[in-house]
Image (cartoon, rainbow, N blue to C red):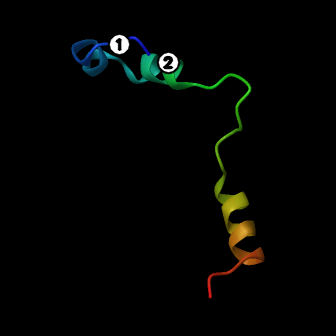
Amino acid sequence: MGVGPEGFWRLSLREWRMLTERPGGAAPLRREDLMRMAESWPDE
């Protein structure tokens, strides 16, 4: 990312998200999706 330790700790949440965002990446998993997956593939 090219940000040194001091700069990293001064990042705002918005700046950190901008640096770590993956363009075209998958959207975060929603609770509804997780629950549907848990029902489809329960732990044994």
Residue at image mark 2:
19
Q: Residue at x 66, y 50 (%)?
A: 29
In percent of width and height, residue 35 lies at 68, 67
Which element type, helix, strand or loop, lies under badge 1? loop
Residue at image mark 1:
3
Report whether 30 appears left or right of 7.
right
Disc 2 and disc 1 in contact, CB within 8 angstroms: yes
Q: Residue at x 36, y 19 (%)?
A: 12
Q: Quadrant of the C terminus?
A: bottom right
Measured in 3D between alpha carbons, the distance from the residue under mark 2 to the one under mark 1, in whole angstroms, is: 10 Å
Which element type, helix, strand or loop, lies under badge 2? helix
Label 2 is placed on what type of residue?
Leu
Give whichever of discs 2 and 1 has the lower sequence position: 1
The circle drawn on residue 37 is: none
Q: Residues within 10 Å of mark 2 (few under 14, many from 20)?
A: few
Report whether 19 appears left or right of 7.
right
Front residue of this view, candidates 36 and 6: 6
**Residue 43 sits in quarter:** bottom right
Front residue of this view, candidates 34 and 7: 7
Q: Residue at x 71, y 38 (%)?
A: 26
- Name above or below for residue 34 compared with residue 15: below
Closer to viewer: mark 2 or mark 1: 1
- Name above or below for residue 30 compared with residue 1: below
Label 1 is placed on what type of residue?
Val
Q: Residues within 10 Å of mark 1 (few under 14, many from 20)?
A: few
In percent of width and height, residue 8 lies at 30, 18
Report whether 1 appears left or right of 43.
left
Q: Quadrant of the N terminus?
A: top left
